[in-house]
């Protein structure tokens, strides 16, 4: 005999069938949240581990120093873990659009050029880009839609988006460790970019090299990424390597985020060195022309707001030189104008 | 083990560094927090995604303080309400509307699925559309209950298919579906109060 359906069950079924499927967050938002949550969780685990070590060390010290006056122990200085509030990491040098920053327990506030970025601060760029100057000659750029937390004077956590680091042409003296879902990245004097999209981390090196201490890898052998190489890491996938030229278009945002050089009173050579570093180009003197001559030619005016090709054209006009860019080869050739040559 | 005990155990595993526990936690809460925020942010998906993410980050930071006194989901929804309120303060947007599921009586009922009931059924029913009520109720159910009900009634899957999806036997799945229907009925009752019987056509 066939059983009759339960009327209550039927009504419940009617209710359930009357509703559309529950809305779901986008896959991108889910991946972004998961990566950020994992980064925060790992950070929490590290902090707890360090705290537990401190507790253990503290008790060991108490046991060993039982004979010593308790007051002396209480006065003994102890290491402070985590960010030290108020300590300046760097300064906002240039802003294109809007960026905000927040510290724990405080509302986010708008950033402006000249604002100090302090330990414990979370910086969010939204649809703006930001360049920060860090003591030691290091330049840090944040692309649009990037979130970054300043953990300490040498430690950042990239929660999402893309950062570009230029340690300066004089040598990588400033140490910096960037934590990403893939692991901890440390440079060896370089220009490089780290991008976090969901659980994927992409690292590209324009100059120099960097070391990645991978998370969850056994044995924990670091990976080295060298100039012109790009490494992409996603959970559960093998590392993917590719080549990337120093003047690839994907670097352009970092130059656009940078504070433009003030050319007024500077030499053509200084301008060329700057623009080549920012755009990954190289320059050379054309036939019959001495590179040293460029030191003596001083510029007047400003290139602020100009695209790089326009800046080159302006400098060429001011200096009465021929400055030709071969964009495919990433090469600038400087020579006298044909008028000068013929004269 | 009662749900609160399971939740506390899950929190402790996460704090002990168990990656599987972390994934379980994230999978169980992210979409629910998104929908919870979505309903309170006028359907603004981008804002709801941001709030869901910031709530999870806040929850991870606060996890060492979680004592299992409330269900993990209840605790997360409380954090989510705070995140939304903080966002509104930051954007200087004030809202005086209270959602039915946020009325304190309804919250207590939904969170316990057996406690106090909302006593203004007509107003509640008038402000909460039926389709939305179903979605709210499903979000308050244990995850496997909601999955089983959606699989059976929205996707018309057989009990065998649901059993395979949940990794259970057919018999255990039938039993699960039965409990899920009862709990769903209770959830609707909490949302609609005394008017639930009428709303459910009983």
Image (tube, helix red, strand yellow):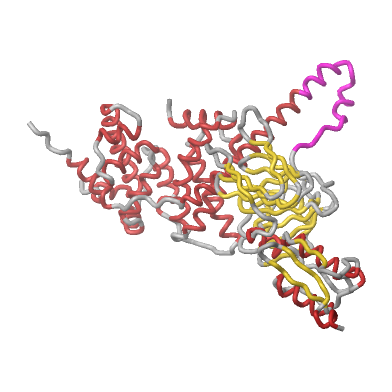
Instruction: Tell me where residue B80 appears, x and y as whole percent.
Output: 52, 48
Quadrant location, the C terminus of chain A = bottom right
Give the residue furthest to the left: A1
| A6 vs A257, nearest the viewer | A257
Which image quadrant is residue A142 in?
bottom right
Q: Is residue A112 visible in this depiction of the protein?
A: no
Q: Does residue A156 lie above or below B96 as drawn?
A: above
Quadrant location, the N terminus of chain A = top left
Task: Report the residue at 51% width, 41% height from top.
Answer: B75
Which image quadrant is residue A70 in?
top right
Task: Report the residue at 68% width, 46% height from top.
Answer: A157
| A138 vs A61, nearest the viewer | A138
Which image quadrant is residue B16 in?
top right
Q: Is A173 left or right of B17, judged from the image as shown?
A: right
Q: Is B52 left or right of A293, judged from the image as shown?
A: left
- Magenta part of the protein: which range? A57-81
Q: Does residue A248 lie above or below A333 as drawn?
A: above
Q: Does residue A193 lie above or below B187 as drawn?
A: below
Give the residue furthest to the right: A296
Instruction: Tell me where residue A57 appears, x and y as whole percent.
Output: 78, 24
Instruction: Tell me where residue A214 appears, x and y as whole percent.
Output: 65, 36
Task: Report the residue at 68% width, 34% height from top.
Answer: A46
Task: Tell me if residue A248 is in the magenta stretch.
Answer: no
| B35 vs A301, nearest the viewer | A301
Q: Is A50 left or right of B160, judged from the image as shown?
A: right
């Amino acid at each position: 005999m066939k059983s009759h359906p339960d009327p209550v069950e039927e009504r419940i079924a009617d209710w359930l069938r009357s509703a559309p499927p529950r809305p779901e967050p986008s896959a991108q938002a889910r991946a972004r949240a998961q990566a950020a949550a994992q980064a925060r969780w790992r950070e929490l685990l590290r902090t707890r581990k360090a705290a537990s070590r401190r507790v253990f060390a503290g008790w060991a010290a108490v046991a060993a120093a039982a004979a010593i006056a308790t007051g002396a122990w209480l006065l003994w200085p102890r290491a402070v873990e985590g960010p030290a509030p108020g300590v300046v990491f760097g300064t906002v040098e240039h802003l294109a659009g809007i960026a905000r920053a927040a510290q724990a327990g405080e509302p986010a506030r708008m950033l402006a050029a000249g604002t100090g970025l302090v330990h414990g601060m979370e910086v969010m760029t939204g649809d703006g880009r930001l360049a920060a100057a860090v003591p030691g000659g290091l330049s840090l750029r944040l692309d649009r839609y990037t979130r970054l937390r300043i953990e300490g004077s040498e430690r950042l956590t990239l929660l999402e988006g893309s950062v570009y680091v230029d340690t300066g042409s004089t040598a990588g003296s400033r140490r910096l460790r960037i934590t990403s879902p893939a692991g901890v990245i440390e440079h060896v004097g370089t220009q490089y970019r780290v991008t976090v999209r969901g659980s994927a981390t992409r690292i590209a090196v324009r100059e120099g090299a960097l070391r990645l201490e991978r998370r969850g890898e056994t044995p924990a052998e670091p990976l080295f990424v060298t100039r012109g190489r790009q490494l992409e890491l996603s959970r559960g996938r093998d590392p993917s390597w590719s080549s990337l030229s120093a003047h690839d278009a994907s670097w352009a945002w970092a130059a656009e985020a940078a504070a433009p050089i003030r050319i007024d009173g500077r030499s053509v050579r200084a301008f060329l060195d700057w623009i080549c570093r920012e755009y990954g180009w190289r320059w050379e003197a054309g036939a019959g022309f001495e590179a040293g001559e460029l030191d003596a030619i001083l510029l007047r005016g400003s290139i602020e707001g100009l695209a790089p090709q326009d800046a080159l054209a302006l400098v060429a006009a001011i200096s009465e030189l021929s400055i030709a860019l071969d964009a495919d080869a990433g090469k600038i050739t400087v020579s006298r104008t044909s008028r000068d040559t013929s004269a | 083990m009662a749900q609160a005990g399971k939740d506390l155990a899950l929190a402790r595993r996460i704090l002990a560094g168990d990656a599987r526990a972390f994934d379980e936690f994230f999978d169980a809460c992210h979409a629910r927090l998104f929908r919870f925020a979505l309903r309170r942010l006028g359907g603004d998906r981008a804002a709801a995604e941001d709030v869901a993410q910031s709530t999870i980050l806040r929850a991870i930071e606060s996890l060492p303080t979680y004592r299992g006194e409330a269900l993990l989901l209840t605790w997360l929804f409380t954090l989510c309400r705070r995140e939304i309120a903080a966002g509104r303060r930051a954007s200087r947007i004030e809202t005086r509307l209270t959602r039915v599921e946020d009325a304190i009586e309804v919250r207590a009922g939904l969170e316990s699925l057996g406690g106090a009931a909302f006593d203004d059924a007509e107003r509640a029913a008038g402000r909460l559309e039926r389709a939305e009520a179903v979605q709210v109720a499903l979000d308050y159910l244990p995850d496997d209950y909601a999955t089983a009900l959606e699989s059976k009634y929205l996707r018309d899957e057989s009990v065998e298919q649901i059993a395979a999806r949940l990794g259970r036997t057919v018999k255990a799945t039938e039993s699960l579906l039965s409990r899920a229907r009862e709990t769903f009925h209770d959830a609707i009752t909490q949302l609609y109060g005394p008017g639930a019987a009428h709303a459910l056509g009983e």
